[in-house]
């Protein structure tokens, strides 16, 4: 096992907002990817009174080797969840919110209607809140994607996660070309909605393979990009192959900008939902 370098070591401080956010989430019976994925940024986010909400339960129908979300029997859809998320967004005073989900291959629409209901509930209660949805691939179902699009989120994100050559090892139930098609379809069906994706480094990819992903993403007009360090949630997950230096992240970020992405965040602790509002703010 590789030893974690100094730039990936953090000291956490207590903050009164941490308790407030946790109690509110508990009282409203809401889930976050911050907790389920063991995100290293959750203390910072909760301290700022923000969180990335995870809908459609906490059990995923897929079992990606990099992810800490539980692979188990999917749960029943909670029809009132969209309203409670909207209430949480209002209580937190969020002007930008990210909604993601477990993958629900058991549902005919992959959960698209529930995403749409959540977007509409937020916009109805807090009209000035921008909504970003981080969606699964919906098994490539174009009608399901259109259901999400018709709810008019400001940003639709779908993470490509890693290079094509590592899909069989890292996310065997996903298909690289299918994920690219999701991102392509977002812009074809709704040119005014911003498209976004994220990739992880440190899984064993080469620089040339990363450049190819960047080119593939620009070929489908993906606009926003995040690049972060992969951190294995446990010894049972896919092992970290490399800790990429901050300088290398800077270099990848500059190359991505040169390739034409409208916004790029590239650093070890960058995650697709972390400080997500910066992408739209940069264009304001």
Image (cartoon, rainbow, N blue to C red):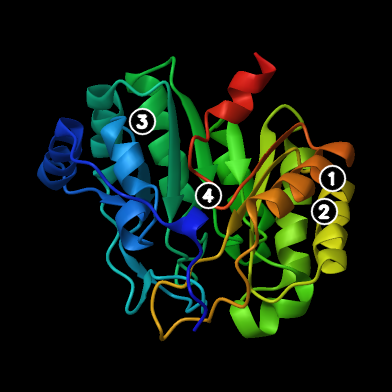
**In the rendered structure, which disc, 2 or 4, sits on the residue that comes first in sequence?**
2
Q: How many marks?
A: 4
Which residue was labeled with disc 4?
Answer: 271
Q: Secondary structure at mark 1?
A: helix
**In the rendered structure, which disc, 2 or 1, sits on the residue that comes first in sequence?**
2
- Residue 197 versus residue 75: which sits nearer the camera? 197
Asked whether the residues under the numbered discs 3 and 1 touch, taking CB atoms below 8 Å apart as contact, a structural biologist would say no
**In the rendered structure, which disc, 2 or 3, sits on the residue that comes first in sequence?**
3
Q: Nearer the viewer, mark 2 or mark 1?
A: 1
Can the viewer see residue 172?
no
Q: Secondary structure at mark 4?
A: loop
Q: CA distance from mark 3 to mark 4?
A: 26 Å
Which residue was labeled with disc 3?
Answer: 121
- Residue 221 versus residue 139: which sits nearer the camera? 221
Please state if 149 lies on the left or on the right of 92 as rendered.
right
Percent x, y of residue 93: 30, 20
Which residue was labeled with disc 2?
Answer: 214
Q: CA distance from mark 2 to mark 3?
A: 34 Å
Which residue was labeled with disc 1?
Answer: 255
Q: Secondary structure at mark 3?
A: helix
Mark 4: few/some/many CA within 10 Å (<14, 14-19, 20+): many
- Residue 267 versus residue 259: which sits nearer the camera? 267
**Residue drawn 59% across and 53% down?**
144
The part of the image, by quadrant, that contains residue 104 is bottom left
The part of the image, by quadrant, that contains residue 36 is bottom left
**In the rendered structure, which disc, 4 or 1, sits on the residue that comes first in sequence?**
1
Mark 2: few/some/many CA within 10 Å (<14, 14-19, 20+): many
Q: Secondary structure at mark 2?
A: helix
Please state if 182 lies on the left or on the right of 129 as rendered.
right
Mark 1: few/some/many CA within 10 Å (<14, 14-19, 20+): some
Q: CA distance from mark 3 to mark 1?
A: 38 Å
Mark 3: few/some/many CA within 10 Å (<14, 14-19, 20+): many
């Amino acid at each position: 096992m590789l030893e974690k370098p100094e730039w990936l070591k953090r000291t956490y401080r207590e903050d009164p907002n941490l308790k407030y956010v946790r109690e509110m989430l508990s009282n409203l019976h809401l889930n976050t990817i911050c907790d389920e994925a063991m995100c290293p940024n959750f203390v910072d986010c909760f301290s700022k009174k923000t969180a990335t909400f995870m809908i459609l339960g906490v059990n995923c129908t897929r079992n990606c080797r990099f992810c800490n979300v539980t692979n188990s029997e999917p749960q029943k859809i909670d029809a009132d969840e969209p309203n409670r998320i909207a209430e949480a967004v209002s209580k937190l005073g969020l002007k930008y919110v990210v909604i993601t989900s477990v993958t629900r291959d058991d549902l005919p629409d992959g959960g698209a209607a529930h995403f749409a209901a959540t977007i509409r509930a937020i916009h109805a209660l807090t009209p000035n809140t921008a909504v970003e949805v981080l969606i699964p691939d919906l098994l490539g179902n174009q009608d399901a994607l259109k259901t999400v699009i018709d709810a008019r989120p400001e940003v639709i994100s779908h993470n490509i996660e890693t290079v094509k050559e590592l899909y069989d090892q890292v996310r065997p139930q996903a298909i690289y070309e299918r994920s690219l098609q999701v991102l392509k379809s977002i812009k074809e069906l709704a040119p005014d909605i911003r498209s976004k994706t994220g990739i992880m480094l440190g899984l064993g990819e080469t620089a040339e393979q990363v450049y190819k992903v960047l080119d593939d993403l620009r070929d489908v007009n993906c606009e926003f990009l995040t690049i972060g360090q992969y951190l294995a949630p446990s010894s049972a997950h896919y092992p970290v192959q490399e800790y990429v230096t901050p300088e290398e992240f800077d270099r990848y970020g500059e190359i991505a900008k040169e390739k034409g992405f409208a916004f790029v965040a590239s650093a070890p602790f960058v995650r697709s939902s972390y400080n997500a509002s910066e992408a739209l703010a940069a264009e304001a």
